[in-house]
Amino acid sequence: MLTNIILPKGLYELLPAIYFLIAAGLVLYVEHSLSWVPAIIFAACGAVTLKWRLSDRRRNRAASESSR
């Protein structure tokens, strides 16, 4: 069963960048021919996390503006 995991705010804010850095590191520094597979997965995780965060911020901003 999945539960809500609460991350420290600093780590939460850096999470997409961490995913993108891991993806870049895999592509640049791992010399295996299939290193692009986990790199794509990490980059996709970073993109999805960033998309969720931006849409949540837009939704929160719209809700706070409509309550004024």
Image (cartoon, rainbow, N blue to C red):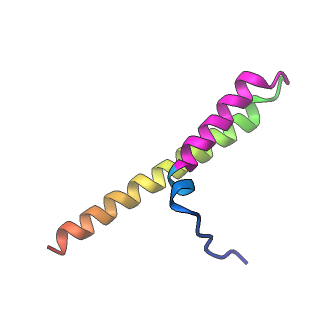
Residue at x 26% of width, y 69% of height: 63
Q: Give the quarter of the image for residue 61.
A: bottom left
Residue 47, x across and y down, in percent: 53, 44
Residue 46, x across and y down, in percent: 57, 45
Residue at x 62% of width, y 70% of height: 5
Task: Out of 68 and 44, give the one closest to the viewer.
Answer: 68
Residue 48, x across and y down, in percent: 54, 49
Q: Is residue 28 left or right of residue 58?
A: right
Residue at x 68% of width, y 37% of height: 22
- Total marks shown come to 0
Magenta part mainly helix, strand or loop?
Answer: helix
Residue 40 sits above or below residue 16 on the image: above
For this orientation, the residue located farthest to the left is: 68
* Highlighted range, magenta: 14-32
Task: Out of 59 and 24, give the one closest to the viewer.
Answer: 24
For this orientation, the residue located farthest to the right is: 32
Residue 35 sits above or below residue 45 on the image: above
Question: Was residue 49 drawn as part of the magenta stretch in this picture?
Answer: no
Residue 55 sits above or below residue 60 on the image: above
Q: Is residue 29 left or right of residue 46?
A: right
Residue at x 60% of width, y 37% of height: 20
Q: Quadrant of the C terminus?
A: bottom left
Residue 23, x across and y down, in percent: 67, 34
Q: Quadrant of the N terminus?
A: bottom right
